[in-house]
């Protein structure tokens, strides 16, 4: 049975290290940006994430591209 994946939306999530808790564990916070263009490259997403993080006081930890995909039978 053949199937097809359709991407409905993509989001950029940037995770920051905002400090250390009393047990010595890193405290991670994230900011998510919605409505990425469908044809945007991973390199462009990473460049935007690093440019945004340069404006922040917290340290960039991770960059995620999150996609909502529906799989349908064709």
Image (cartoon, rainbow, N blue to C red):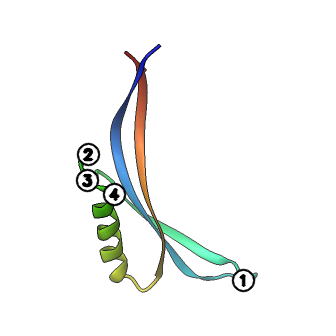
Where residue 27 sits in the image (x, y, percent)?
61, 76
Q: How crowded is mark 3: few (under 14 residues within 10 Å), some or many (20 or more)?
A: few
4 or 68, which lies in front? 4
* Residue topped by disc 4: 42
CB atoms of marks 1 and 2 within 8 Å: no
In percent of the image, x 31 and y 62: which residue is there?
Answer: 43
Quarter where residue 56 is shown: bottom left
* Residue topped by disc 1: 24
Quarter where residue 24 is shown: bottom right
Where residue 5 sits in the image (x, y, percent)?
39, 30
Which callout, 1 or 3, points at the residue further toward the start of the chain? 1
Name the side, left or right, on which 19 lies relative to 41: right
Q: Is residue 59 above or below residue 46?
A: below
* Residue topped by disc 3: 40
Which callout, 1 or 2, points at the residue further toward the start of the chain? 1
Q: Is residue 66 above or below residue 15?
A: above
């Amino acid at each position: 049975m053949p199937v097809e994946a359709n991407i409905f939306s993509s989001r950029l999530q940037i995770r920051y290290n905002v400090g250390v808790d009393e047990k010595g564990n890193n405290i991670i916070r994230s900011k998510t940006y919605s409505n990425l263009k469908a044809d945007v490259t991973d390199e462009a997403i990473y460049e935007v994430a690093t440019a945004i993080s340069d404006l922040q006081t917290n340290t960039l930890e991770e960059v995620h591209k999150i996609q909502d995909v529906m799989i349908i039978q064709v």
